[in-house]
Every structure is written in structure tokens, then in C-alpha cells.
Image (spheres, grey):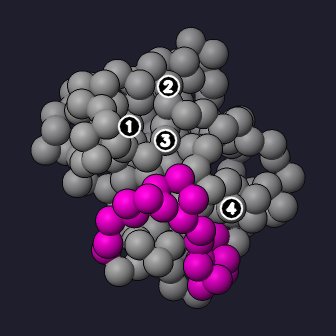
């Protein structure tokens, strides 16, 4: 399976590295996220992506709207890859790991050959560790790329593509 995993477009909170707080589900992408997302979308358009998945949070939906316009592909919104709530004490690391693993297992069960996944830092850290090593620990939660970076994981190999530069 080939995975194309990336964070939502840049938000005020991600740009200035501040906590989302009450805006965790409603934070919007910044205007400067649009060209970066378009470059990423044109790359995906030229790849053989079988299915597109996204967190249902607003910033991911806005990111995927840009990608849908360019690729012409539909997207499935899945709450299992929503923003991590561990830092807000709404779920344990084990709970978050279980829901992201369940999402990953569903991709395997559906025999999807390639998937594009737009999500958040924590779920990206869990997914990439799970795919690459088969194990995840809480220390892995901070191991995720900045916005505008696409992780391509294929046959156990990781490639990172940065679309922040024109």
C-alpha cells in the first residue's frame, strides 16, 4: 500500500505554535496555505491515489476542498483521524492510538492500494510509526511534519516532499 499523509493547511495556531484551545474543531486555514495546498494537490493529481480520507475538523475540510477542486476526487471524512485530544486530557494516548489503528486497519481490510490522508500532527505521528515500524509509543506524538509537507510511505520506505517552496 502507498500512503500520502499530510497535515491540514497552515492555521494561525500552527504558524505561531500556539494551542488550539477552544478553536480545535473550528480553526481555519490561512490565505497563504492555499498556494501550498494547490502545489500538493497537483502532485497528488499525478499519482495513482485510490482513496482520499480526512479528519472532519474545519481546517482539514478546507484543505481537502482545495485538493478536491484540483484532483476531482471525493473525500471520506473520518473522525478516527481527528485531532489528538491527549493534550487536552479528553482521551488517553491508548485511546487515540486505538482509534488511529482502527482507521489504519480499515484501510487494509478494504484492500485499498493507495490512500491520501489529511489529518493532524498526533494522528500522523501514530500512522507513520505504525506503518513503518508496527509499534508506537507516546514519545512518537511529536514526530510529525510541518504543514505543507507530504509524507509518502511505500514498501516500508518514507519520502518527505516539501510544498512550502514555490
Residue 127 tag number: 1
SS for callout 2: helix
Above or below 60: residue 123: above
Above or below 49: residue 159: below
**Residue at the image position 60 percent from the left and 33 percent from the top:** 78
SS for callout 4: helix
**Residue at the image position 32 percent from the left and 65 percent from the top:** 19
Using the rendered view, name the quadrant where residue 109 is placed.
top right
Residue located beneath label 2 in the image: 103
Q: Quadrant of the C terminus?
A: bottom right
Q: Nearer the viewer, residue 68 or 10?
A: 10
- Examine the residues drawn in magenta and state their main secondary structure: loop
Residue located beneath label 3 in the image: 82
Report if the CB atoms under discs 3 and 4 are less than 8 Å apart. Answer: no
Magenta residue span: 17-37
Report if the CB atoms under discs 1 and 2 are less than 8 Å apart. Answer: yes
Above or below 41: residue 154: above
Amino acid at each position: 500500500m502507498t500512503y500520502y499523509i499530510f497535515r491540514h493547511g497552515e492555521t494561525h495556531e500552527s504558524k505561531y505554535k500556539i494551542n488550539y484551545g477552544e478553536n480545535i474543531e473550528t480553526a481555519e486555514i490561512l490565505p497563504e496555505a492555499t498556494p501550498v495546498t494547490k502545489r500538493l494537490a497537483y502532485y497528488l493529481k499525478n499519482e495513482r491515489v485510490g482513496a482520499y480520507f480526512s479528519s472532519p475538523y474545519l481546517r482539514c475540510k478546507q484543505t481537502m476542498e482545495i485538493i478536491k477542486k484540483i484532483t476531482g476526487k471525493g473525500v471520506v471524512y473520518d473522525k478516527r483521524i481527528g485531532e489528538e485530544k491527549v493534550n487536552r486530557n479528553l482521551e488517553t494516548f491508548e485511546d487515540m492510538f486505538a482509534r488511529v489503528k482502527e482507521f489504519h486497519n480499515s484501510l487494509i481490510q478494504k484492500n485499498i492500494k493507495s490512500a491520501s490522508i489529511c489529518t493532524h500532527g498526533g494522528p500522523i505521528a501514530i500512522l507513520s510509526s505504525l506503518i513503518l515500524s508496527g509499534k508506537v509509543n507516546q514519545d512518537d506524538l511529536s514526530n510529525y511534519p510541518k504543514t505543507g509537507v507530504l509524507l509518502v510511505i511505500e514498501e516500508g520506505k518514507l519520502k518527505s516532499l516539501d510544498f512550502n517552496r514555490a
